[in-house]
Structure formats: C-alpha cells, structure tokens
Image (spheres, rainbow, N blue to C red):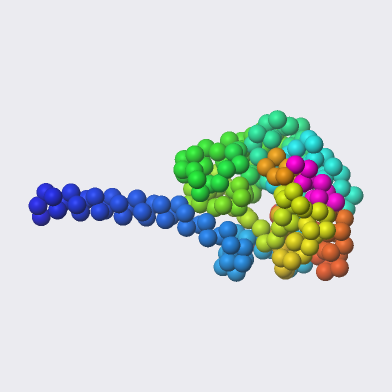
Amino acid sequence: MKTGQLLLAGGGALAAGAAGIAVGHLLPAVTTWRGLRCWALPSLAGVGRADHVALTFDDGPDPASTPAILDQLDRLGWRATFFVLGPMVRSAPSLAAELAARGHEVGVHGDEHRSHLQRTPGAIRDDVARARDSIAEATGVAPTWFRPPYGALSGGSLAAAHRLGLRPVLWTTWGRDWRAEATPSTVVADVAGGLRPGATVLLHDSDCTSAPDSWRATLGSLAPMAALFADRGLEVGPLAEHGVRAA
C-alpha cells in the first residue's frame, strides 16, 4: 500500500474511532424519552414496587423553600429522596445535614446544573465527584443515587456513576413544577397523568434553576397529591424503599 493510501486509511480509522466515541457519549440520551425508558430500562426510569411511589426532589437544598417543604412532608408522614446541587450544599451545609437528620435520602444532582450532553467525560466525572464529596461532608452519609441535570444521561454520566459507586435513576412522572404557570392543581394533574405502578415522581424543592417562586406550586401540591396516592392505595417513600432493581 502506498504512503498516501496508508495516510488515508489511518485518517479513516481515526475518524471512525472519533465517531464511535461520540456515539457512545450521546447514545444514552435516548433515555430522555420517558415512555422508552420506562419500557426498555425500567430500573433506570425508577420503576419499583407496584404499591409504592418514590418521591424525589431536585435542585436544593434552598433555605428559601426547602424548610417549608420539609415541614409539609413531616405533616404528611412522608420521606423522600432529594437530589441536591453541590453549590447549594456548600452554601447551606446545615440544611443539607437536616435533610438526612429528618430521615430523607440525599442524592447527587451534580455540581454545575448543565446538560451532560454538552460536557466531556472528564468534566462530568470531576463535577459529579465534587458534588458527591460535598454531600458526604455535609451530611456524614455517602450518597447512593445520582440524577444528572435535566435527566440528560451521556456515556460520561454512566461512566462517572460507575466509577464513583452511584446508581443513576431518572423518573417515570413529573409535576412540571418548574414552570412560571405551574399551580398546585397543574402539578397534581401532571403527576397523575403519568402515574403508573412503581412510579418515581420528580418535583423541585428550589427555584434556583426554575421560574421564580415556582416552588410554591410544589408545596401547595403535596396535600392534594397525598389524596391522589391514598385513593390509589399507594405508599410514599424514598428510593431506598422503592424496590428498584439494580440496572
């Protein structure tokens, strides 16, 4: 083979390798389709016991909103899993510690609230590790669960979770409570619209990445949501009690 042909072949192999890496990084993003992941990857979607709902909150802990949500959860007798952000933990470590002290799980949402589809695997690993370490330092408990910002999983997300001993989990239904137009009734209706046996529910206990004061719709939805779950005979608790199988 001539030198030019060798160079062309080598360049083609490099291009194919780069394309393969890119596909491997982006392919997990198909899990953003809830229907697909619930059917094909139920463990990743958070499908658990049929008679149980895993209640989860993202983006805290926030001194402006999380305490009110914690008090309402106490009144309802519920415990939940909170996927927190590193900077929020570092700015309010005592509140992060309070989450754990009041019986809730604290999971990793990341350090920077930025889609992992736009980041390199190394940057994702460093980001998740920093958030994990901040949570462990504040709460005294090593986190178990990991949910990437926007639920946007990449190959780098999965590699980081594996390396750091975290279990990735998304959700099966959500309240769309980040929207400016959200109200307690719309949050409940959106959760009910996607409710299925073994559901994992996504809500937010902070508006740090959402519309200002949107957390109030979340807070107001919890009591009517309790009636919804009771009518369907569903228990409510954190992911640790949900019976999600290992992926």
Residue at image location 30% in from the left, 52% down from the top: 15
Q: Position of residue 182 (x, y in %)?
A: 77, 53
Q: Residue furthest right?
A: 75
Q: Residue furthest top?
A: 91
Q: Which part of the image, by quadrant, shows the C terminus?
A: bottom right
Magenta residues, dominant SS class = helix
Q: Position of residue 229 (x, y in %)?
A: 83, 63
Quadrant of the rendered structure where residue 227 is? Answer: bottom right
Q: Which part of the image, by quadrant, shows the N terminus?
A: bottom left
Q: Which residues are magenta?
A: 212-220
Q: Position of residue 199 (x, y in %)?
A: 71, 63
Q: Position of residue 78 (x, y in %)?
A: 83, 53
Quadrant of the rendered structure where residue 135 is? Answer: top right
Q: Nearer the viewer, residue 139 or 14?
A: 14
Residue 78 drawn above or below residue 129: below
Residue at image location 66% in from the left, 40% down from the top: 85
Residue 37 falls left or right of residue 91:
left
User: Can residue 21 be seen?
Assistant: yes
Residue 178 drawn above or below residue 139: below
Residue 155 falls left or right of residue 8:
right
Residue 179 falls left or right of residue 183:
left
Residue 34 falls left or right of residue 235:
left
Residue 108 drawn above or below residue 189: above
**Residue 219 is inside the magenta segment:** yes
User: Can residue 106 be seen?
Assistant: no
**Residue 238 is inside the magenta segment:** no
Residue at image location 18% in from the left, 49% down from the top: 7
